[in-house]
Amino acid sequence: MVLSLASRQNLILAVLRSSKEELSGQALHGRIRSEGGSMGLATVYRHLRSLQQQGEVRCRHLANGEALYAPRDRDVHHLTCVECGSSSALANCPVEQHSLAIHTPTGFTALFHTLEVFGICATCKATK
C-alpha cells in the first residue's frame, strides 16, 4: 500500500509524538519499519525537512553534528557537553520563563525556537 504525502507526514508525527525522547532520522526510520511501515530513509528525511518548514517538527544538533527531531510542541532545551556528548534537558524554557520578546522583521513568521548551550560537563571537567 502506497501512502499519500499527508499520510507519510502523519505517520512521522505520530512516531515522534509517541517517543519520549528526540529521535534521529535513522532511529525514526527504524521505528517506522519495526511497526510495519515501508518508507525509505531518504523519504523520512525529506518529510522531516518539510515538517520543519511547516513548523510541525523541531530539530536540534548535537556537538557531533547528529540531528535529533521532536514535535514542535515539545519545547525542551539542552546543555550539551562537547567532550563526551552527554546532553541534559533544562527544566524550563528560558525564553518563555522570562517572557523574552523576539523582535522579528516585518513579514517574518516565527514557527519555533531552539536553545542549545554547549560546554564541558562536570565529569569531563574533573578528568582534565
Image (cartoon, grey):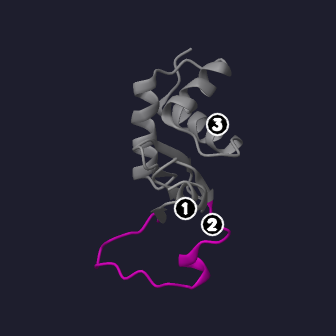
**Callout 2, which amino acid?**
Leu
Instruction: Please tell me which residue is depicted at 32% across the width and 71% down the height of the picture.
Output: 108
Q: Are marks 2 and 3 in contact (CB under 8 Å)?
A: no
Instruction: Please tell me which residue is depicted at 44% across the width and 52% down the height of the picture.
Output: 54
Instruction: Please tell me which residue lies in front, 106 or 26.
Output: 26
Q: Quadrant of the N terminus?
A: top right
Categorize mark 3 by other alpha carbons within 10 Å: few (<14), some (14-19), many (20+): some
Instruction: Please tell me which residue is depicted at 59% across the width and 45% down the height of the picture.
Output: 22
Categorize mark 1 by other alpha carbons within 10 Å: few (<14), some (14-19), many (20+): some
Marks 2/3: CA distance? 23 Å
Assign a secondary structure to mark 3: helix
User: Mark 1 = which residue?
Assistant: 79
The quadrant in which residue 126 appears is bottom right
Instruction: Please tell me which residue is depicted at 52% across the width and 18% down the height of the picture.
Output: 2
Assign a secondary structure to mark 2: loop
Residue 15 has which mark?
3
Residue 90 vertical placement versus 63 (above, below): below
Q: Are marks 2 and 1 in contact (CB under 8 Å)?
A: yes
Marks 3/1: CA distance? 25 Å
**Callout 1, which amino acid?**
Leu
- Which comes sooner in the sequence, label 2 or label 3? 3
The quadrant in which residue 31 appears is top right
Categorize mark 2 by other alpha carbons within 10 Å: few (<14), some (14-19), many (20+): some
Residue 25 is left or right of residue 16, and the answer is left
User: Mark 2 = which residue?
Assistant: 90
Magenta range: 89-114
